[in-house]
């Protein structure tokens, strides 16, 4: 009598992994083409007939101040194979691969508001992950849905202020930001504009100047036909005066020139003033209002090689 397990998990190496492409997001499929690379963590699950049924995909992350960990970018089990332990088996094998590579923690981020969110959160809770923590508010709106928002009314630009395209800043403007930040940090590290400017959308990415000095910016990117407002900030002294609205307003007004109708704002929850503004003034005009959540799993060294509880076996050690 056959005792073949219903599925088997194995780390994916070099070679053709195209059968797994349908198990992850289009933007991540290129990782499968290089699955043998040390910078990629890929674990596949196959059924008893060797057909791929699921995939866990990630990469190692090294933050100078934050140790080493693995970012799980995607975890997917095909619908007809769910509820049979494949997801748990994939995570176990992924964790074992992380430990082999010297990575004692896995982190993942996901977006709420999907049909799978409740299932995913139960799955994570049952697998020992930390409680989800809110990270970013994600607000999507169309030009139509925000046209009635009070902050979309036309503001007169105060004296001594001007709005220019981000790409039109001179080298002197740019060194002014760098030098003043070095002298007295006034920009939060995660909103430092030079970290976000690559490939920015040229028409709608703007800078706010006060008496010739750059005091704020909105830096945007075109992502699959949507304008993502990636990084926006104005100097603390101007925040309470709502000057960032000048920038949003001008940026939105320029969207048709860039051929864009839909905008997406991502607001870090650790910037409370921005998050409060988004909840109060943007949510009512949004076509989508969700958040991304972060979770972590601390990996324990397994005591021995035991098969997964649901009958699957793993090619690498499960983490228990
Ligand atoms: C989340 C997902 C990976 C789970 O895979 P799976 O193979 O069905 O999970 P398992 O069978 O290993 O389930 C493990 C535990 O998760 C929980 N769980 C899984 N599916 C569940 C469901 N539909 N309802 C309630 N709990 C569920 C249970 O606690 C289960 O433990 P149990 O079997 O002892 O009750 C799978 O549902 C999936 O691919 N979803 C869509 C994609 C997704 O959301 N990916 C993650 C973001 S990138």
Image (cartoon, rainbow, N blue to C red):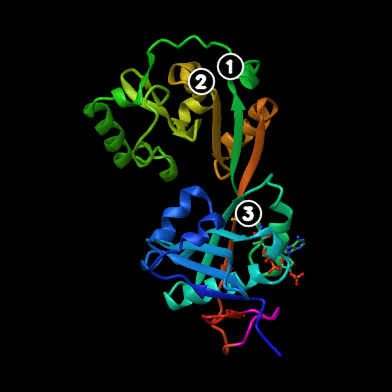
Q: CA distance from mark 2 to mark 3?
A: 30 Å
Closest to the observer, 71 or 250: 71
Residue 118 lies in the magenta stretch: no
Residue 33: percent from left, percent from top: 40, 59
Q: Main secondary structure of the magenta part?
A: loop
Q: Mark 1 near mark 2, Cβ–Cβ under 8 Å?
A: yes
- The residue labelled by disc 3 is 133
Q: For this view, does 101 lie left or right of residue 194?
A: right
Q: Is residue 177 above or below residue 126?
A: above
The kind of secondary structure element at disc 3 is strand
Q: Are discs 1 and 3 less than 8 Å apart at CB? A: no
Magenta stretch: includes residue 310:
yes
Q: What is the quadrant of residue 178 in the picture?
A: top left
Question: Where, quadrant-wise, is the C terminus in this rendering?
Answer: bottom right
Please tell me in which quarter of the rendered image ligand 1 is found: bottom right
Question: Along the polypeptide, which appears first: circle 2 or circle 3?
Answer: 3
Q: Which residue is mark 1?
A: 152
Quarter-wise, where is residue 301 in the image? bottom right
Q: Residue at x 57, y 34 (%)?
A: 274
In three-dimensional space, the C-alpha distance between marks 1 and 3, rounded to whole angstroms, equals 31 Å
Q: Residue at x 31, y 33 (%)?
A: 177
Disc 1: CA contacts within 10 A as few (<14), some (14-19) or many (>=20): some
Residue found at x 55% / y 64%: 55
Q: Nearer the viewer, residue 51 or 13?
A: 51
Magenta part of the protein: which range?
Answer: 306-312
Nearer the camera: disc 1 or disc 2: 2
Residue 72 in view here: no
Pointer 2: what residue?
A: 252
Relative to residue 17, is residue 187 depicted above or below?
above
On the picture, is 214 further left or further right than 225?
Answer: left
Among the two numbered marks 1 and 2 on one chain, the one whose residue lies closer to the N terminus: 1
């Amino acid at each position: 009598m056959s005792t073949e397990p219903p599925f088997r998990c194995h780390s994916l190496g070099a070679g053709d992994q195209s059968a797994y492409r349908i198990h992850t997001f289009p933007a991540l499929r290129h990782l499968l083409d290089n699955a043998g690379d040390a910078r990629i963590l890929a674990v596949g699950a196959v059924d008893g007939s060797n057909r791929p049924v699921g995939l866990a995909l990630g990469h190692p992350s090294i933050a100078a101040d934050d140790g080493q960990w693995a970012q799980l970018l995607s975890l997917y089990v095909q619908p007809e194979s769910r509820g049979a332990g494949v997801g748990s088996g994939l995570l176990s094998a992924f964790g074992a691969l992380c430990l082999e590579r010297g990575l004692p923690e896995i982190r993942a981020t996901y977006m709420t508001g999907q049909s799978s969110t409740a299932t995913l959160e139960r799955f994570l809770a049952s697998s020992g992950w930390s409680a989800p923590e809110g990270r970013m508010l994600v607000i999507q709106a169309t030009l139509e849905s925000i046209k009635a928002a009070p902050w979309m009314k036309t503001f007169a630009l105060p004296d001594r202020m001007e709005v220019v395209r981000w790409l039109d800043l001179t080298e002197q403007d740019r060194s002014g930001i760098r030098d003043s930040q070095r002298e007295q940090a006034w920009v939060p590290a995660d909103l430092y504009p030079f970290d976000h400017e690559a490939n920015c959308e040229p028409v709608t990415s703007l800078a706010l100047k006060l008496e010739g000095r750059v005091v704020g910016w909105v830096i945007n990117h075109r992502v699959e036909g949507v304008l993502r407002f990636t990084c926006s900030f104005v100097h603390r002294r101007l925040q309470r005066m709502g000057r960032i609205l000048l920038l949003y307003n001008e940026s939105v007004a320029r969207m048709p020139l860039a051929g864009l109708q839909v905008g997406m704002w991502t607001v870090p929850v650790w910037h409370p003033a921005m998050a409060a503004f988004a909840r109060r003034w943007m949510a009512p005009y949004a076509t989508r209002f969700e958040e991304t959540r972060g979770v972590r799993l601390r990996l324990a060294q397994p005591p021995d090689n035991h098969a997964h509880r649901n009958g699957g076996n793993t090619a690498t050690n499960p983490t228990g």
